[in-house]
Image (spheres, helix red, strand yellow):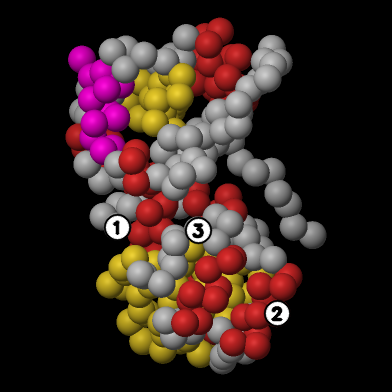
């Protein structure tokens, strides 16, 4: 029977925990490495709803992208995710910036693949910036529409200071600060999940387009490919995508 340690070791092969950024908190954050796993729930985040879902499904483990414990805990509310994990005896394995930065399989690679970017590599000009190309030059509005469809977004923001694009930079989640590096490497557009007003202004001045698809949608794209990758390697474990978690954002 598969142990948590075996799953953790598998992750070390393509998203080693020591590659995470200094501020991060990754790895097994709740539980024991020796624990056996027959069912695991996979989610972008671990909330109280996700823990309850895992408990109802009989999961011994939740694998998430965002750490369930990030800052030091000063108190534990009885409805908080860490409290509920301990209450139900469910472990939490969290792979954050190490999965973002993975050059073999990770969030940015999955994001690029989903939106049709080819030959994606990590840029040496940005902390968490990947770059590749579309098969052919594409009108910016058409590209933005494709991103919306590929990521199943209810809406997104984009600019078109360049009317067509080919070289595409991606930086999932809160990657808007990579706009300067993306411009430096000659990208036509940066696809990200969060970008600030002053960064959009800078992008306009630097003549580089942006697509802001939302933090959740730009990163949730890794979950199903990750489930497939884990299932291929651990045939005795049932990996399930969380239905309980979404960012609950609506557009009007």
For the N terminus, which image quadrant?
A: top left
- Please tell me which of labels 3 and 2 falls first in the chain: 3
- Residue that label 2 marks: 201
- Residue that label 3 marks: 172
x, y percentage for residue 96? 45, 42
**Can residue 233 be found in the magenta stretch?**
no
Would residue 251 be found to the left or right of residue 212 on screen?
right
- Please tell me which of labels 3 and 1 falls first in the chain: 1
Q: Can you see residue 43?
A: no
Quarter-wise, where is residue 78 in the image? top right
Residue stretch in magenta: 1-12
Residue at (45%, 24%) from the top-left corner? 29
Q: Can you see residue 118?
A: yes
Q: CA distance from mark 1 to mark 2?
A: 30 Å
124 vs 241, nearest the viewer: 124
Q: Is residue 36 above or below residue 5?
A: above
Badge 3 marks a residue whose secondary structure is loop
Residue at (46%, 19%) from the top-left corner? 30
Quarter-wise, where is residue 37 in the image? top left
Badge 2 marks a residue whose secondary structure is helix
Badge 1 marks a residue whose secondary structure is loop
For the C terminus, which image quadrant?
A: bottom right
**Can residue 4 be found in the magenta stretch?**
yes
Q: CA distance from mark 3 to mark 1?
A: 14 Å
Q: Is residue 86 above or below residue 66?
A: above
x, y percentage for residue 9? 24, 31
- Residue that label 1 marks: 103
Determine contact: label 3, label 2, CB under 8 Å.
Answer: no
Q: Which mark is residue 250?
A: none
Residue at (30%, 41%) from the top-left corner? 16
Q: CA distance from mark 3 to mark 2?
A: 20 Å
Would residue 35 be found to the left or right of residue 163 on screen?
left
């Amino acid at each position: 029977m598969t142990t948590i340690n075996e799953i953790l070791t598998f992750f070390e092969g393509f998203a080693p925990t020591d590659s995470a950024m200094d501020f991060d908190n990754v790895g097994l954050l709740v539980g024991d490495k020796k624990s056996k796993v027959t069912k695991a729930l996979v989610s972008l985040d671990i909330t109280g709803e996700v823990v309850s879902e895992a408990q109802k499904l009989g999961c011994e483990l939740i694998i998430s992208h965002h750490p369930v414990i990030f800052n030091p805990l000063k108190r534990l509310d009885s409805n908080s995710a860490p409290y509920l994990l301990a209450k139900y005896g469910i472990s939490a394995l969290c792979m954050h910036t190490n999965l973002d930065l993975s050059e073999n399989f990770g969030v940015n690679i999955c994001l690029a693949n989903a939106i049709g970017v080819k030959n994606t590599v990590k840029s040496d000009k940005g902390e968490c910036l990947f770059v590749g190309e579309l098969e052919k030059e594409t009108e910016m509005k058409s590209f933005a529409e494709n991103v919306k469809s590929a990521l199943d977004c209810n809406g997104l923001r984009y600019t078109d200071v360049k009317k067509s694009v080919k070289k595409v930079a991606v930086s999932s989640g809160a990657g808007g600060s990579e706009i300067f590096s993306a411009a430096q490497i000659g990208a036509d557009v940066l696809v990200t999940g969060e970008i600030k007003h002053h960064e959009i202004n800078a992008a306009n001045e630097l003549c580089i387009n942006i697509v802001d698809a939302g933090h959740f949608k730009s990163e949730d794209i890794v979950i199903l490919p990750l489930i497939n990758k884990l299932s291929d390697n651990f045939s005795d474990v049932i990996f399930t995508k969380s239905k309980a978690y979404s960012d609950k954002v609506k557009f009007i």
